[in-house]
Amino acid sequence: MKDMQQYGFVILRYVHDVLTAEFINVGVVLYVPSQGRVIAKTRNTMGRLRGVFPDLDRAAFNSAMSSVRHGFRKIAKRKSTAGLFTSHDSVLAIAKEAVPHDDSSLQWSSVGGGLTGDVQETFDRLYNQFVARYDHRSSHRRTDDEIWRPVLAKLEERNLATKLHEKVIAGSLDDVTFKHAWKNGQWHVYEPVSFDLAEADSIKGKAREWLGHLAAVVADGKTEAFKPHFFVGAPSDPRLNAAYEVAKKILSQAPNNPEVFEEAQLDEFVSQIEDEVRAHDAQ
């Protein structure tokens, strides 16, 4: 197995309208504390921005992005940050050197992170997932199975895929089938949920369905002990990001305190499964 490195990342967002919370991702910064390595990239073209925000001021946006790229080049040249910053959370401090936190239309996301055996591959995946995908119009909506494919690939890489099996959690009123599960005292159940849908109501409705399923199963308090883990996929249309955020909150408030992981947390998600399975096997 490759040596795993801790990393942190933040996404740069162009917030078109603060009141409606409409935004589109325009850049990524990734930091590896142990290597003192910073990788940063922003979009070079407007891509789908004008299609999403027709009233976008092209000149002002291009000027802002030019300034961001200059800042990104500065922080990407850093070769000796190891020791100065010891946590992946420090990526936000580094990113703010390029774009300070203020009330402008350019805002940083919260910090994400995980473990990776290939820093460049992880960065490219994050950039494609959060930025480049907005440049391609497509009527294709990703299914739950498609959301799970990168997870399955990582599990197979670590010889863990065969550890997970389908599990039916049954209650007196209803039952629910989880596609991936294993038992360690209680059942750990994992389910991919694609929110790559066409309408905001559909996104929130899908989350409510899972909330209802779990509520019905545990209603009598007699089900087997289980811990739900959801791996969720974001919508392709950035105008649906607000609905997506609501859907994640709905899932997290379902019975049995589910954990909700996003696609950017792929490495963290798989590492958590690996750590728990290896620890159980070692007993």
Image: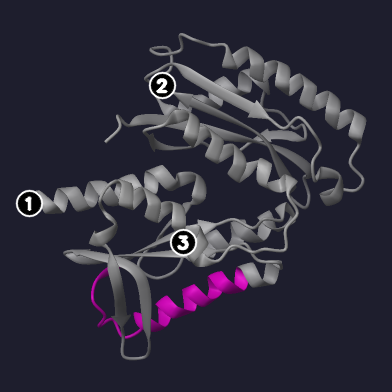
Residue 186 position within the rendered picture, expressed as x and y whole percent measured from the top left: 21, 66
Which mark, by number, is residue 208? none
State the scheme by which the image is colored: one colour
What is the three-letter code of the residue carrying label 3? Answer: Ser
**Residue located at (41% from left, 76% from top):** 214
Q: Where is mark 2, residue-wise? A: 33
For mark 3, give the secondary structure.
helix
Q: CA distance from mark 3 to mark 1?
A: 31 Å
Residue located beneath label 1 in the image: 283
**Mark 2 or mark 3, which has the lower sequence index?**
2
Q: Report the residue at 67% width, 63% height from top.
A: 140
Q: Nearer the viewer, mark 2 or mark 3?
A: 2
Q: Residue at left 74%, top 45%?
A: 135
What's the magenta region? 204-226
Residue 13's place in the image compared with 87, above or below, is: below
Q: Label 3: few (<14), some or many (≥20) within 10 Å?
A: many
The answer to whether residue 48 is left or right of residue 193 is: right
